Each structure stands twice: as structure tokens, then as C-alpha cells.
Image: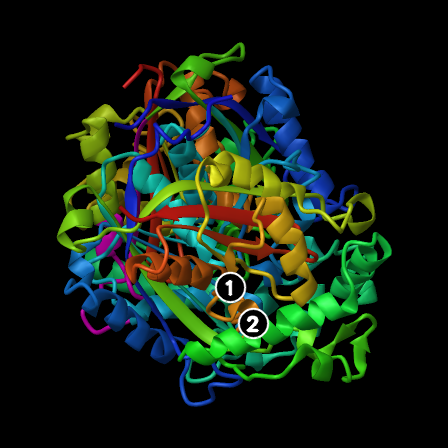
Amino acid sequence: MAERCAVIGVGQTHHKAKREDVSIAGLVREAAKMALADADLTWSDIEAVVIGKAPDMFEGNMMPEIYLAPALGAVGKPMFRVHTAGSVGGSTALVAAHLVKSGIHKRVLTVAYEKQSDSDAMWALSVPQPFAAPLLAGAGGYFAPHIRAYMRRSGAPEYIGRMVAVKDRKNAMRNPYAHLHLADIDMKMVEESMMLWDPLRYLEACPSSDGAAAMVLAAEDAISGSYPPAWIHGTAMRSEPTMFAGRDQVNPQAGRDCSADVYAQAGITDPRGQIDVAEVYVPFSWYEPMWLENLGFCELGDGWKLTESGATAFDGDIPWNTSGGVLSSNPIGASGMLRFLEVAMQVRGQAGEHQVDGARLALGQAYGGGSQFFSMWVVGSDKP
Amino acid sequence: MSAATASAVRPVSVASFAQARNVRRDEEHNEVEMLMPVIAEVFGNIGITKDDVDFICSGSSDYLIGGPFSFVMALDAVGVWPPRSESHVEMDGAWALYEAWVLLQEGEIDAALVYSFGRSSLGDLNEILALQLDPYYMAPLWPDPVSLAALQARALIDAGKATEADFAAIASRSRRDALGNPNAQVAKDIPADTLLEEPYVVSPLRRHTLPPITDGAAAIVLAAGDKARQWSDKPVWITGFDHRIETHALGARDLTTSPSTARAAERAGVGDGPVHVAEIHVPYAHQEIIVKEALGLDDSVAVNPSGGPLAANPVMSAGLIRIGEAAARIASGEARRAVAHATSGPCLQQNLVCVLEGE
């Protein structure tokens, strides 16, 4: 029988294009120390450390748990490294949660990071491999055709993507940790930005960030800290193959199955009605309407209508990405964990300027690979 | 601090194990093609399909293939359609097994597939493994793993804990034992005295004390509850499991000991009963002396009867193979209680210990 598990501490760095003031170790420590302070704990209270990040080639440091063990206070403890592509920040939190839910550990520190300025993610994504089509255009080039397919299927007008780009950047103005603070952002500014991968313009794409996220997860009898715990109501992961003829990359089955699983655990039958706030992995603007449909917040083809109606805006009935989302901060390996962390902050009532009033049940989602790896959790202010 | 004490552990069995034949260089298969027969065998051994497992976890490293996301395409060897609950660690498959075991402890799932793969031949391991070191102060100097292991071997000699003849005896025994292992890459009967005539690669290490460069893959099915009994008449149970890490700063460690192995062994309960067989992940001959001491094993224990990593060392799979080999000795009736060990990082920095028992 699984134990109850809750988030009792959160920490994140100020995300920036280049954090030249810290090493990789300094970056992860910054987030970890903040999470420990939030939980009112010290390093010695932690029993195990679980880290995650995107490909090692992004920084050129192979299997970084080896280098980071002392920086994260893991010497003499179990230390674990997760890698599930873009969903990794979420998956890492889930592996940490299982260490508590299984009864093996009482308090686990989980940290995810990326220091993109140490290397070149675009290069690392584009290394030619035998018998595989080269991905020379980076992630945006991979996803743009799926976005066009979504626009054609749904009949969505082209300005929807720009609306998401503006909304998430406006939300980021409320978040002191966000990388992008674009005070003057508006539809015209997005429209006038350079076309990168048709239909995606520069301001409809996520930035490249240095940053880290950290959380302390604890068992029911090890709760501490001044904010109330964010109880985990459900956890799920799903994967599907990169390519085969029957695959729907616009509305992946793995995403639908993953949300069905996590909703069943959390007792959610009406996502739009029951979920107060959601942080969803939207690295390119159009993924908001696409994931609205994939996550069952509306009928197929209606996602863009929700975005257009303002339902997902900060003052809408289902605020999405009130932190500014991946569009405003993208330390790749940490981007998934930031989604999970932000919803924990919401149900703990510690989100400050971007706090949604009365948030009690929240969804965190991350995806990776070619829209094929999904990780999700539902957290709530009530004990499950 | 709560521990996964023996009484709290949910019994999980190593229901099936398969590995590729370990070779110096497999040029004819990509990772998926290398894994497919292994996955087919690990399911076929117990007459199940992928639909019978609830979770999949793999271990591998992008740096071996030299491209990002090498685990993504490898998943095609299983064929995750419809979509499956699945995870991956950028660690040896032994740690992927640990993640799956943790999930099984929760009691909500009953079976998992774990696999790992490593084609060490694709690049230069001496350059690749140097990238595991501190990226600011150490990696730019490109210290290769053989030179670092040589520092450790020298420290052992200086401490009076071993001689070069001891290293040769371990290598000679391992390669001789490997003659009985059809999957071994290096198997031969050469006396230790002859081995000592080889020149040094990096003093005090001679060629025979180094692991071979190996392409390989392995898979294990874990089962709990009714499935463990359905899939085997004589289940091999995991009764203790733990792993620990040390600092990366080699100068801050006593390289002649392995406190992380000792701690993991204590937590896994190695000393709670007799150990008949130990399969330990010691890529360099001298490391057997250190790990054996840390595990508290005396000379009555058969160490690496498969030949161990000196007979085949597929990076990222060699640790998982230790667990499979140890389980196989129990399944065959040769042993009733066994210890398996996996390591990661330079000079045994991170260590995992798994205790296995028959009925």
C-alpha cells in the first residue's frame, strides 16, 4: 500500500540566458538550498537525492550525478539520475515521489536543471545519426509541421498562437524568477518578430535558459515548513514510439492515456470544472490549444476557442501557466519540474503575484521527445 | 530515518534474465537490433509478452552512441504501442532495476521489464569517460579512466593491501571461469605468472587487469505477488537493495576502501545470512579486493563465477548483468543466497548492492 507524499519545500533559480556567476554545481545548489529553507530543513535531513536533466551533451558533462554528489549533499546517500527527454523534470519528481510513496525514504530532495549557456542545445540536438533523418532545425523545426496539422484540422485562426505568446509573457511579469520579462509585449510585437519555423515566430518560441528547480518531498509523518504541504493526488507517465504509420502526433495517445490515469487517481472526471490551475509544457505557443484538447479540458477541435475566449488567462476560469510557462523560462531539463513545482506553490498559497485565489487542486504536465513522453501529477491542498 | 528493512520489503523476484553475447565490436546491428533478441528471450523464457508487464525502465548513456536521446529509438525494441508507463535513467541498468523495484514496492503494479544497452566500441572510452569528471577543473585535463584506476591500484599497493601478483591472480581466475560462460567476450586459461610478464599499460596496471571493450545488452523481468509464482516454480527473491554515492573529488577519498559499498551492503542486509556467490561489478582486477572487503565477503565466497567484468564489460549493462548472473546461480540451484553489485563513476565512486535469495 502506497504511503501519502507531499511537496514541503520548493526552490528555483532566477532563470537567465547566461548564469555566468555560478558553475553547474552552484546553480543546482541555489535551487536546492532554497527548497531546504522553505521546508525548514538542512542537508542532513535529506535521505536521498534524485536529479534530472535533458541530454548530457547539452553541457558536455556525462552522467552529472557523479560530479554533483557533494554539491547536493548526497555523499553517503542514494543518488539517482533520470533522463526521459523534455518530460524529464516531471519524471524526476515522480521518481522522487515513488521513493517516498514506497515507504523507502521519508524525505527526498529532487533537483532538475539545465545550463544551456555552457553549450549549444541546438547543436546537441542536431548530431547526425546513422539511418535517421537529421533534425538540423532543432525542436521548433520538428514541431512546426504538427502545429500546421493542428491548424488545418481545427480551423484555428492564425492569431491564436500569438495570443498564447502574449498571455504567458504577461503572466511572467508577475513571476520574479522568469527569464523573460517583456513589459511591452502585445500581439503586434509578436507578429513583427522574425519567422523561425512557419507558422512559429521568434516570440512564439521558448527562450534558452540557465536555471534549476528543486523540491523536497516528504512522507505524511515527516511534514515540515511554514507553508502547508501540497499533497500528491496522482502521478502518471506514458511513452509511445517516435514514429509509425498509425501515430497521431497532434493529439498523442500517450498524453490522453497519461491524463486519464492521473485523473482517475485524483478523482477528476471534469478537468475544466475541477482543476483550479494548470502548468502545462507549452514551449511553442500553439501547444496550449493542442494540450487543452489532449488533456480533456474541451472537445477535440475546441482548444483554440478556449484560448481565444480568455478561459486560460490569469483571470479566466482555468488559468494555464500563470508562472509564464516554458515560453518565459526554459532551462530544458528543469522546465518539466518547474511545471510540477509551480502547481505545488499554487495549492500551498505561496505563488505571490501569480497566486490564483483559492487554488486547491492543480495539474502539472510535461512532455518530451517527439510529443511521445508524458509525465503528470495532480497536487492538492487537501490530503488525498 | 526509516529504512527498507527486511520485514518491510515486498518480495520481488528476478523472474527472467537474458543478455546478448558480449563482443568486442558489433558492427551489424544498431541498438534496437541488438536489443530485440534480448527482449524476445527475456519474455520467451517465461512465456509472457510485453502486455504482461506494467512498467518498463531502461538504462543507457547518450555519450556511447554520440547522439542525444539514444534511449528514445531503443524503445522500439519493445514496441510501446499502445502507450506504456515507461522511464529511463542515464545510469547502468542496475539503477533502472532499482527504479522498477521501488515502483513494485508500492504494491500497485506486479511486473516490470528492465533493460540496458551499451556499445562501447563506437567511440573512445578513454575520452568519453573523462567527461564524467568535474567539467571545470578535471575534464579539461582529460584524465582517462585507466590512469585513474591505476592511482587506485597504486594506493592499494602502497597501503600494503595487495600486490601486482594479486591483481594477476584475480584476472587469471576470472578469465578461466569465463570459459564456462557462453556469453563471455574474453575467456582463456593463462596462469598469473605468465600475465605478470606483460608490460604496463599504466603502472601498476597491465593489460590483463583492465576490462575488455564490449558491446552488449541485457534485460530482466521483475515480478511480485501472484505473477512471481506463476512465472517460476522456484522464484529468486530480491531481499535487500540499496545504493550510495561518494564525492567526485578523488583526493578527498581513501581509494583503497569503498565506504559507499559498505553502507549499501549494510542497508541491504548482506551480513544477515551466508553468501554463496557474489557477482560484483569491478571493471579493474584490483577493485575486486576493495569491493570484497566492503561487502564483508570471506574467501569461501565464489566471486564472479561468470568471469565478471574482466570477461565482458558492456558499459551501462555490466551492472545489470551482475544481478542477472547472480540470480541465475540461484535459479540453477548452485547457490541459495547471492550478492550482486554494480558501480558507476571513477574508482568505484557510486555503488549498488542487491541481495538475492532462493527458497
| Residue at mark 2 | B174
The verdict on residue B177 being magenta is no
Callout 1: SS: loop
- Few, some or many residues within 10 Å of mark 2 (<14, 14–19, 20+): many
Q: Disc 2: which chain?
A: B
Find the magenta span and give its range.
Answer: A233-256
Task: Find residue B281 and report its image quarter.
Answer: bottom right
Residue lying farthest to the top in this orientation = A226
- From the viewer's side, name the closer residue of B9 and B48: B9
As measured in the structure, the alpha-carbon distance from the residue carrying label 2 to the one carrying label 1 is: 7 Å
Q: Residues within 10 Å of mark 1 (few under 14, many from 20)?
A: many
Instruction: Return the x and y of residue B231 as percentages of the image width and height.
Output: 17, 55
Residue at figure coordinates x 37%, y 55% from the top left: B335
Dot placed on the residue nearer the N-terminal end, 2 or 1: 2
Amino acid at pointer 2: Ser
Disc 1 target residue: B304
Q: Is residue A21 above or below residue B85?
A: above
Question: Between A348 and A68, which is closer to the camera in this rendering?
Answer: A68
Q: Residue at x 61, y 37 (%)?
A: A181
Q: Are the residues flagged by discs 2 and 1 in contact, CB closer than 8 Å?
A: yes
Residue A42 as seen in the image, left or right of residue A373: right
Q: Position of residue B328 (x, y in %)?
A: 34, 62
Quadrant hosting residue A101: top left
Pointers 2 and 1 within a single chain = yes
